[in-house]
Image: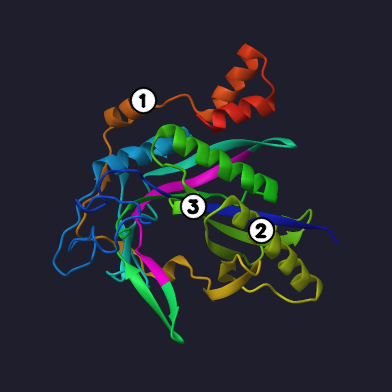
Amino acid sequence: MEYEVVIGLEVHAEMATRTKMFCSCPVVDSTQAEPNTTVCPVCAGMPGVLPVVNKQAVEYGMKVGLALGCTINHTSLFDRKNYFYPDLPKGYQISQYEHPLASDGLLVVDTSKGEKAIRIRRAHLEEDTGKLTHVEENGQNYSLVDLNRCGVPLLEIVTEPDIRSIEEAKAYATTLRGILRALGVNSGDMEKGVIRFEANISVREAGTDVLNNRVEIKNLNSFRAMERGIAYEIDRQIKIMESGGTVAQETLGWDEANGCTYTQRSKEDAHDYRYFPEPDLPPLVVDPDWVHRVRASLPELPRARAQRYQADFGLTVADSALLVADT
């Protein structure tokens, strides 16, 4: 029997603003700064504090949305996404869900089989969590919490389940990273965690349109990890199906050292997060003139520039891709 993989990607990209999403704390390099040195009552989740939306983060989010052909929604809403994690001090994340900043886009990528159009479901603003460092010392295991990253603006970009191969997944991820860098909204330094991928993967019998149970691999912070994680899951799910079993819908982590996924928790649906409107933030209303100004400021994007190099200078696809990758 032949099988087909169905993949949707969620990309979390930190917005390269000077300050955090809802407070005036500076954004610092979490790999270099001393832990817990850029924290205030707002991003530490103290009672009674009030968040204020970072205007620059909104503009950067609009830039990305427009570059991806999205509709910038006149009104978007912030919600509270409730879940417990040790580096989430409020016990909830301020995010967007049903009413995002941008929606209904399209990204065309190049593969060995030609162009592939991948639909963008939404691009929404939210805040990042803190960072945990796991320590093993004197036979004891414990975790240290650094809140420097807590509250850094994130743009989450969610595709439809349009991706059908590892090659297409990598093409999408690399193309999107190039766009973020060209727009100047993200450094693209994946080794610093400023871009993180989450892959939703399911396998079905080729030729059918059924959507089987999917798994989500969290926090893949390199193209290599993303490719290996997807490949492992495809193989694992096919083996389960061929043995007559059913793939459990769950959230997985990726063990880079051992080259395998592992269970983190059962897969949540939206109702598990108990979304409700953020009471301390009014609706985010974007003026059409602002959208027009942002659209006019967009630079030539990498794929368009590569095509221009090919047409104007007779460069090969490979040479033009190499040039735009470094500029």
Q: As shown in the figure, which amino acid type bears the numbered disc 1?
A: Ser
Badge 1 crowding class, 10 Å Cα cut-off, few under 14, some 14 to 19, many 20 or more, is few
Mark sitting earlier along the chain (1/2): 2
In the picture shown, does residue 80 fall above or below 113? below
Per the picture, the main secondary structure of the magenta-coloured stretch is: strand
Circle 1 residue:
297
Q: CA distance from mark 3 to mark 1?
A: 29 Å
Residue at the spot x=67%, y=55% of the render?
6
Residue found at the far front of this picture: 138
Circle 3 residue:
191
Residue found at the far top of this picture: 312
Horizontal and vertical percent position of residue 32: 35, 55
Badge 2 crowding class, 10 Å Cα cut-off, few under 14, some 14 to 19, many 20 or more, is some
In the picture shown, does residue 51 fall above or below 271? above
Start and end of the magenta stretch? 117-133
The mark lying in front, picked from 3 and 2, is 3
Circle 2 residue:
228
Instruction: Tell me the element at label 1.
Output: helix
Badge 3 crowding class, 10 Å Cα cut-off, few under 14, some 14 to 19, many 20 or more, is few
Horizontal and vertical percent position of residue 85: 38, 73
Residue at the spot x=75%, y=37% of the render?
113
Instruction: Tell me the element at label 3.
Output: helix
Q: CA distance from mark 1 to mark 2?
A: 37 Å
Horizontal and vertical percent position of residue 227: 65, 54
Query: Position of 16 compared to 10: left or right?
Result: left
- Based on the displayed image, in which of its 4 quarters is residue 289 positioned? top left
The mark lying in front, picked from 3 and 1, is 3
- Based on the displayed image, in which of its 4 quarters is residue 117 positioned? top right
